[in-house]
Image (tube, rainbow, N blue to C red):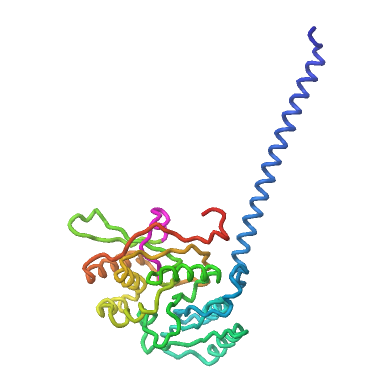
Amino acid sequence: MRGSPLSRRAAQRFRQLAFLSVGSVKVKLLLGFCIFFTLILLFFRASTFIQWTQYHSFVDQSDLHRKDYTLLINTWKRNDLLKKSISHYAACLRLDSIHIVWSEPDPPSESLNRYLKRIVQKYSKNGRKVELKFDVNNEDSLNNRFKEIKNLKTDVVFSIDDDVIFPCSSVELAYSVWQSAPDTMVGFVPRMHWLDHSRSNRDYFEYGGWWSVWWTGTYSMVLSKAAFFHKKYLAMYTNEFPASLREYVAHNRNCEDIAMSFLVANATGAPPIWVKGKIFEIGSTGISSLGGHTEKRTECINRFVAEFGKMPLVSTSMKVVDSRNTWFW
């Protein structure tokens, strides 16, 4: 016996309400999951930013008194940035000493010297002593950042510009990677080169910036604005690298970082190692912001290839990530 029209409408209405109720629950669950996931991402992003000033506790406390690398920081008339950088890196636990490459016409002021030494003394506790020294140069040249340093106590230097900050945890990770390959450059800023096949009559190479690395997934250089390398390469750059190329770098005020990449690759026959790290840009201007930067660096690469008689740079797609702070790697 068929039900009345009223009962059928009631049943239909009930089914509609049930469907809407289930759909509402699904939407709420989806929204709840999205909110939860967003909060997790914000938490990890905040923890990364905190690393600016606070070293993570996952570092073995037995390493507190280890002194392993020298900070080699290049600066030019940006004392405010220099102060920020020194204040940050002085807190990194495996730091042994700080060498400031000073190429300005006037020597560092007493007030700057006192300020930086107070910062260093702040972290010189419990048997740990961080040394600070200005390496004053008589001429302004980009080659100064790679001058040989006599009586350097550490085997490795961490070459850094004054306008970039990396968390101490990232620096320590890169240092541990360098320990596994001490002849290699290990750094945070990858770049690449490639052969321009449109010039069929001769080998001509192009310089590729970050977007080229991102697009292809390969690189052949890590820039010395943030890289570890053995101190022996300072001596090699000063004493063995072709004088004509050092003069080229000084005259063009560019490409000293590419020159160091050529030197290391030529010595090792191996690619560098890129370590992924969160970078904080605290400066606003630099050589890379000038017009024609990529074209000038392309010219540098081909000038270096002509002098070396070959292309020593080796491409790779390997990237090191810290899985302790990364969900997707």
The residue most toward the front is: 62
Q: Is residue 326 located in the magenta-colored stretch of the structure?
A: no
Q: Where is residue 199 in the image (x, y as percent from the top left)?
A: 22, 56
70 shown above or below 297: below
1 shown above or below 126: above
- Report whether 322 appears left or right of 202: right
Query: Residue 286 versus residue 321: which sits nearer the camera?
Result: 321
- Report whether 122 appears left or right of 235: right
**On the image, which quarter does residue 47 sit in?**
bottom right
Give, as a single range, the part of the protein colored magenta. Answer: 210-223
Is residue 79 among the parts visible in the rendering? yes
Q: Which residue is drawn at 39% across and 61% down?
A: 209
Instruction: Report the quarter where the N terminus lies.
Output: top right
Is residue 288 among the parts visible in the rendering? no
Query: Residue 119 versus residue 320: which sits nearer the camera?
Result: 320
**On the image, which quarter does residue 21 sit in?**
top right
Q: Residue at x 36, y 67 (%)?
A: 293
- Report whether 280 appears left or right of 138: right
Q: Position of residue 6 (x, y in %)?
A: 82, 15
Q: Residue at x 55, y 71 (%)?
A: 168
Q: Where is residue 56 in the image (x, y as percent from the top left)?
A: 61, 69
